[in-house]
Amino acid sequence: MSADERRRLMDREMATVMANHATILSNQEYVIEQLTHQHDCLERLKVAVAQSAEVTEEVRALLSTFKVMGKITKWGTVTSAAAISVWHAVKAAWRTFW
């Protein structure tokens, strides 16, 4: 093989290596872009989950308040009904005996 043929072969090999290197760099840039996008999406998802957890806690607090208010209302209703019943009983007894 002559020196010119060897030089042309080395030039072709070098061109192939450079083309492969450019492809690798291009792929690396694409991967970096995709990873950055994925990271950004994950960060937004973390924020959304944290906000959702805050809303869930607020709803739980509200529901527990409703539960307490329901118990107070039931107690008030029963107590009022008992007081009204006693009042009517006393009034009926008063009319009957006096």
Image (cartoon, helix red, strand yellow):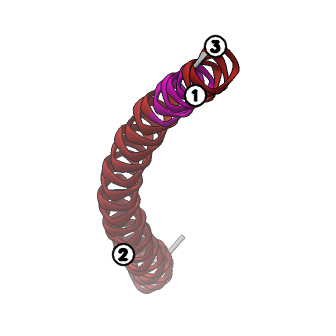
> Residue 61 appears in which quarter of the rendering?
top left
Find disc 1 in the rendering and name its residue: 91
Residue at the location (41% across, 59% down)?
A: 45
Which is more toward the observer, 39 or 16?
39
Residue at the location (42% across, 63% down)?
A: 38
- The residue stretch that appears in magenta: 73-87
| Dot placed on the residue nearer the N-terminal end, 3 or 2 | 2
Find disc 2 in the rendering and name its residue: 33
Residue at the location (36% across, 75% down)?
A: 33
Determine whether the residue tagged by mark 1 lies in a helix, strand or loop: helix
On the image, the x and y values in percent for residue 68 come to: 41, 30
Majority secondary structure in the magenta region: helix
Find disc 3 in the rendering and name its residue: 97
| Dot placed on the residue nearer the N-terminal end, 1 or 3 | 1
On the image, the x and y values in percent for residue 47 come to: 29, 59
For the residues bearing labels 3 and 2, Cβ distance under 8 angstroms: no
Three-letter code for the amino acid on which mark 2 is drawn: Glu
Q: Could you tell whether 14 is left or right of 23 in the image?
A: left
Determine whether the residue tagged by mark 3 lies in a helix, strand or loop: helix
On the image, the x and y values in percent for residue 29 come to: 35, 75
Q: How many C-alpha atoms fall within 10 Å of the one at disc 1: few (<14), some, or many (≥20)?
A: few
* Quadrant for the C terminus in the image: top right
Q: Magenta segment: does it hold 27?
A: no
Three-letter code for the amino acid on which mark 1 is drawn: Lys
Relative height, residue 6 to residue 57 (above, below)? below
Q: Could you tell whether 59 is left or right of 29 in the image?
A: right
> Residue 72 appears in which quarter of the rendering?
top left
